[in-house]
Amino acid sequence: MNRAQKVVVGAICALCIALVAATFALFNGYFDHGLFEIKQTHWSSSGNVTILAKRSDHQALSSDVYFVVIGNHMFSATELRNAYHGARVIFAAASDCLRIRWNDAYSLTVSCHDGLLDTSHIENIQQHQSGDVAIAYVNIPDINRGAR
């Protein structure tokens, strides 16, 4: 292989690595400039914490999103961003009516205090189990019911 071919192969490899890194960053929230803030936390006796967080982006055309995650520690803004773009969100909706409460060590309730939440506000994420935690919903319709 002559010198020109080596340069071309090296440039193609560098471009491929840059594309993989940019794709990874895109799908993990690194380009998300939204504001992530904790609205409510609730600790269980088993040491888990449920976090109700808000993602707002005043430059986007979408509304604020409130989402619920379960962890074993308080999340930083960066951890909330990563959780929002990963698989850790158990529920998300475009409504500020959400509240969280542990019933016991392994039973969590997510509720809407303003009456019934409209299904059009739910962001297609509604888990009923997360690890060993059972999740119940009050005043929130089951979006998974039709898929069963």
Image (spheres, grey):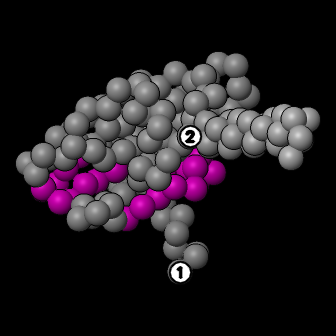
Looking at the picture, which amino acid does disc 1 mark?
Arg
Q: Residue at x 56, y 40 (%)?
A: 28
Q: Residue at x 51, y 55 (%)?
A: 125
Looking at the picture, which amino acid does disc 2 mark?
Asn
Q: How many marks?
A: 2
Position in image of residue 119 (x %, y %): 58, 55
Q: Which residue position is annotated with label 1?
A: 148
Range of residues picked out in magenta = 101-128
* Residue 132 or residue 147, whichever sits in front: 132
Residue 146 seen by the camera: yes
Instruction: Give neighbour class at mark 1: few <14, some 14-19, many 20+ (Cα, 10 Å).
Output: few
Position in image of residue 122 (x %, y %): 56, 50
Examine the structure image and report whether residue 102 is included in the region drawn in magenta. Answer: yes
Q: Which residue position is annotated with label 2?
A: 28
Q: Is residue 84 left or right of residue 2?
A: left
Q: Secondary structure at mark 2?
A: loop
Q: Which quadrant would residue 106 be assigned to in this image?
A: bottom left
Q: Secondary structure at mark 1?
A: loop
Position in image of residue 101 (x %, y %): 23, 46
How far apart in space, not on screen, are marks 1 and 2 (Cα)? Answer: 29 Å
Residue located farthest toward the left when viewing the structure as drawn:
45
> Does 133 sit above or below residue 121?
below
Residue 116 seen by the camera: no
Q: Residue at x 69, y 40 (%)?
A: 17
